[in-house]
Amino acid sequence: MLIQRFLAQFNQVDFDELLIAGAVAAITFLAIFGLLRLLGKRLHRADAAGQTERPVAQLLKETLNRTSVLAIAAVALLVGLKTLELPPLWEERLGHLWFIVLGFQLVLYFDRAATLGARRYFRNHAEHPDSPTTVANTLMEWALKTTIWVIFLLAALSNLGINVTALVASLGIGGIAVALAVQNVLGDLFASLSIAVDKPFEVGDAIAITNASGTVEHVGLKTTRIRSDSGEQIIIGNAELLKNTVRNYKRMQTRRVQLSLKINPATPAALAARVPDALIAVIGRQPDVRADRVHLKSVTQDALEFELVFYVLDSAYLKYMNIQQAVLLGALEVFAELGVDASAPTRRLLFEQGAEAANEAAPPAQPLPRHSRAGGNP
């Protein structure tokens, strides 16, 4: 019925005016299409010449490729119809069509720009440029696209005269109910986005949290999987993981090593004074090591304690352990060369018994022999 009324209005228009409108629509289509093709070719040539290294130029070139030919044709047709004298009712409807067509094309541009922007962000913050697309990247793209299309749909309905207030309110109430029902899942989901954006750690990093340590194997939407040092796989929720203090060992540039060595407290002072320089020489012989200090830390009746501090200029754990072992073995050789006794002092325990305990432990006295009376026979 609506189409019949529309055609009836066109029956009242002169044929010459229709020809003019058609010519204007065709010229508009060719002009817009040719302009976009020309701009695309220039951007392609600039890209081939290496002149579009700037992100904005790259984004513009990729976004223009999302231009819809159908939208161009619709715009050209609307421009042609604009030359006709139509009733006010159709003028209003043409205004709605203008909004929908232009809005649809803009949404296509924004959709493409959101996809490219999200991918560029994750690629720039990835450890390797050729890393595969992560789940967080896909989730962020989906969230941005959904937001763009929902806003366009609501704006189009509002432009057509439909009251979207009740619809938005119902969506808000429904969203609150769903959020309360799945708040734990949403907490892990947003924690996954936080991990993807902030990147406190990545797959392959060696991390340690409060009750576990190991290598990150996978970061999912709800959980993160860690291969522990003892071999088992630890699965922990993303929200719970971010509540802990995370130590990322892979991003270490140097390792600070602090050792304590004890020698016999009876060592002469002159001999003990030679120990720090000798230990500094042992540390200096190790590759990729920067010596910091060696000091006599404490003097007690049990030992003379020396503290060694040096830095391993490599984050590899195996190299750190090898260097620490070499320093300790070198320290033993130094002690042997200097004649320093690294063993604990010998202790002797003396036990004394009191007078009463000695009397109790003494053997009983023997009775004296009986003598016969004077003058008598025994």
Image (cartoon, rainbow, N blue to C red):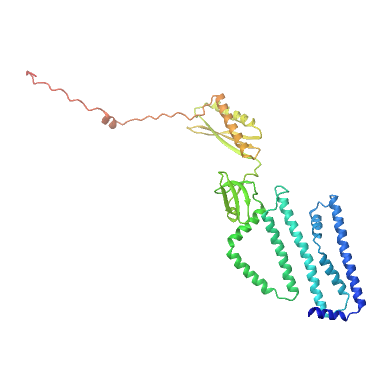
Task: Answer above or below: position of 204 versus 274.
Answer: below
Percent coordinates x, y for residue 352 in the rendering: 34, 30
Percent coordinates x, y for residue 143 in the rendering: 69, 61
Percent coordinates x, y for residue 279 in the rendering: 59, 30
Q: Nearer the viewer, residue 57 or 229?
A: 229
Q: Nearer the viewer, residue 197 or 89?
A: 89
In the displayed structure, does residue 267 sit left or right of residue 11? Answer: left
Q: Nearer the viewer, residue 4 or 216?
A: 4
Question: What is the quadrant of residue 106 in the picture?
Answer: bottom right
Task: Answer above or below: position of 251 versus 271.
Answer: below
Task: Answer above or below: position of 5 versus 377.
Answer: below
On the rendered image, what quadrant is the N terminus found in? bottom right
Percent coordinates x, y for residue 22 in the rendering: 89, 72
Question: What is the quadrant of residue 286 in the picture?
Answer: top right
Q: Residue at x 71, y 59 (%)?
A: 141
| Residue farthest toward the left in the current orientation of the protein | 376
